[in-house]
Amino acid sequence: MWKTRAIIPILILASGCRIAPDSAIQTDLTFQRGSQLLATGSPKTAIPLLTQVVASVPDGPEPHAMLSLAYALDLQSERAIAQAAQVKRKSGEPPGWERMAVGIAELARGRPDEAVRQFDDIREQVGPESPMRVAISQWLIMALLLREDHQRALELLDELALTPAGTTALLWRVLVYSRQGDTDEAVQALTAVAGDVAVSRPAPVNIGQEMGDHMLYDAAIRALGDGDLEEAEKIFDDLQQRHSRAYDAPTWLALIAAADGDWTSARSRLDEARLLGSMQSRGIAHQLHGVVYAMERMPEQVVRAMVVGQRLLGRGSSPAHAVTQPKPDRVWFSDAMK
């Protein structure tokens, strides 16, 4: 299955969130649980817990920031913006997740120009070393796609391709280039992803019916990494016929169709990929669908797709109980695709 650089999420919440320095908040299990639920794609469930913390610690900026983010991801845009206004930070302190919430809320309201302004401003304020930087860039790309600024979106994707979020950037580039009709670039992006995956996988000797599923998968990845999309598609089709839910073949097939320039087929296969394959593969397919929705100018669907995808990616990877510090999760576009 897909195993490559860590897919940095569109909301690296668990790894990027800094709990308020107040030790009372750091150890508050309700706050931690609410943050964990938010990080794993359950904003609606997180809202009551974060509301409870806000009531207990009305002056703490982080609970307000997290609650505003939860409202934004739950598509309660007006409440997200109002809650963000309640965040009181010290003079000179950079903004936090509350500004991200405002940008997402503006995006969901179909105001991509304002969303771009918000994300550009927060990117400048937090600086290149901020743990929020990648997530801000990814949401900014979504806003740019919504307003059909594909050129700048691709420039930002080129930047992200050089970071730990490189796999995410390559996947998005496949879809963006496909939508623009630039199949050469789409193929290059896709083969780069497959080549990254193939590095740690054994090269198959022969391809035939006697091959096991894992060997077939390796053969498909090798073919794709070599740029032989036709052969890769044939093998992935065979693998999907054998085990429709065990592998991520449906997602690969959707990306191959996109790289081939067949947007209609890619769209259809991506719909299928959201229902078939491994749970992680379905999560990634949902989030790739978010990119499609952005290019088709369906803002609310963008946020919905991201949240559903993150929920699928988070299942089984997040502890059921609260812990002192949430461990880094592969959230919001995890690059470790299996």
Image: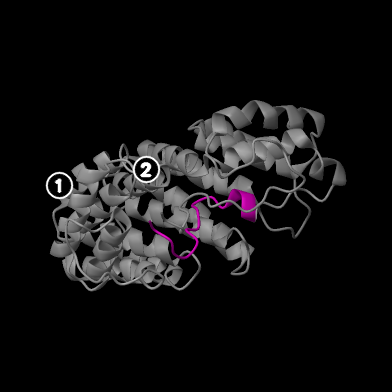
User: In this rendering, does residue 125 appear at all?
Assistant: yes
> Callout 2, which amino acid?
Arg
Q: Residues within 10 Å of mark 2 (few under 14, many from 20)?
A: many
CB contact under 8 Å: marks 1 and 2: no
The quarter of the rendered structure image containing the C terminus is: bottom left
- Residue 82 picture location, percent across and down: 61, 34
- The picture places residue 179, in percent across and down from the top left corner, at 21, 56
Q: Amino acid at mark 1?
A: Thr
**What residue occupies the far front of the structure in this picture?**
210
Give residue 54's quadrant in the image.
top right
Q: Which residue is mark 1?
A: 264
Which label's residue is closer to the chain start, 1 or 2?
1
Question: Magenta stretch?
Answer: 1-15
Magenta-drawn stretch contains 18: no
Residue occupying the point 19% across, 57% down: 235
Count of number-bearing discs: 2
Q: Which residue is mark 2?
A: 282
47 relative to 126, above or below: above
